[in-house]
Amino acid sequence: MATIEITHTAADGTLVDGDTERGDGTGDILKRYGFRWFRSLRQYGMPQSRDRAPRVVAIEAAAEELRAAGHTVTVEIDEEVRDNEAVRADRHERLEDRRAALSAKGEKLSREADSLMKASDAMVEHLPLGQPVMPGRRGRAHRNLLERSVTTAIKSAQTRQAAEQMPARVAGSVRAEAYRERPDVTARRVDRLEKELRRLDRRMAGLTAHSSDALRRQYEGERRVLVERIEGDKKVLDEAKAAGTFGRYSKDNVHKGDKVHVRGRWRTVVRANAKTVSVETGYSWADLYGYEEIRRVHCEHGEPES
């Protein structure tokens, strides 16, 4: 029987360590509770559990079933929540490592493509240009050589194409990270997290004396994480407001009939709401956008913005 340790930390997430072996049944049990095999770490763990609240209910249930199967199991859960600055810095570092790996992979594929093309040329360089292929057995070697040359050239082209995709993937990763850090995206994330917090509070209020301690611990952990993320993102928004890059527009300075520049287009305001602005679409309905998405305003009540 195996000796297994299930741990959870904010930095590493939920991981399983121990002397498990293929066919001992531990993998099947762990998979039933949301664990997956991480090839890079060579161990089981819960996907997307880093800097998330531990899934205490699933962890405890998996540990209980493993013990019932005869294994020795210990569970260690660190419920400390990392602050937003540490989480953002860690995420950026992981993305930079991934981009460096993609760039290195692109260079490696490019070298492989060059090598394959040279090998393809070397296969046929001794053949006179335009030499016909003899029929039957006499031309078999010639035909095989030409086929190998063409196959290698095709593989070289495919490898070259894969290498040329790496810079685009790196650039896409940079754009995605920049998008996540935009103040308007951060504001929408705060709204979403606050809704999640209210839903969680309602679930916690519905707990009874019969509710399990594991479920109560899980909810409490989820709440701590949500509160930290909301406070951290609000701090980012406060800094953006102080820098003048966020919070410039509201119901107080956007009016019906104004022209607003949203997502690359000028739109006419139909109604200024508390958190959103309704704009004309040319049809019978209006589109809604948050004030944080407005880039410029042309207002008849004041000077037009450039």
Image: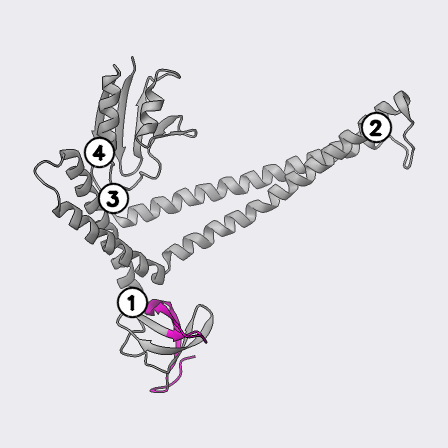
Residue depicted at 21% across the width and 32% down the height: 77
| SS at badge 1 | helix
Q: Secondary structure at mark 3?
A: loop
Where, quadrant-wise, is the N terminus in this rendering?
top left
Q: Earlier in the sequence, mark 1 or mark 4?
A: 4
| Mark 1 lies on residue | 241
| Labels 1 and 2: the sequence-earlier one | 2
Q: Which mark is residue 271?
A: none
x, y percent for residue 111: 64, 37
| Crowd tier of the residue under label 1, counting other residues whose Cα lies within 10 Å: few below 14, some 14–19, many 20 or above | some
Q: Amino acid at mark 3?
A: Arg
Q: Per the image, is 304 magenta? A: yes
The answer to whether 32 appears left or right of 199 in the picture is: right
User: For mark 4, what is the residue?
Assistant: 57
Q: Which residue is mark 2?
A: 143
Residue 229, how many percent across, how many down?
A: 25, 51
Q: Which mark is residue 82?
A: 3
The amino acid sitting under disc 1 is Lys
* Label 2 crowd (10 A; few <14 / some 14-19 / many >=20): some
Of label 3 and label 4, which has the lower sequence position? 4
Q: Amino acid at mark 4?
A: Val
The quadrant in which residue 127 appears is top right
Quadrant in the picture for residue 39: top left
- Specify the farthest residue to the left: 209
Name the amino acid type tagged 2.
Arg
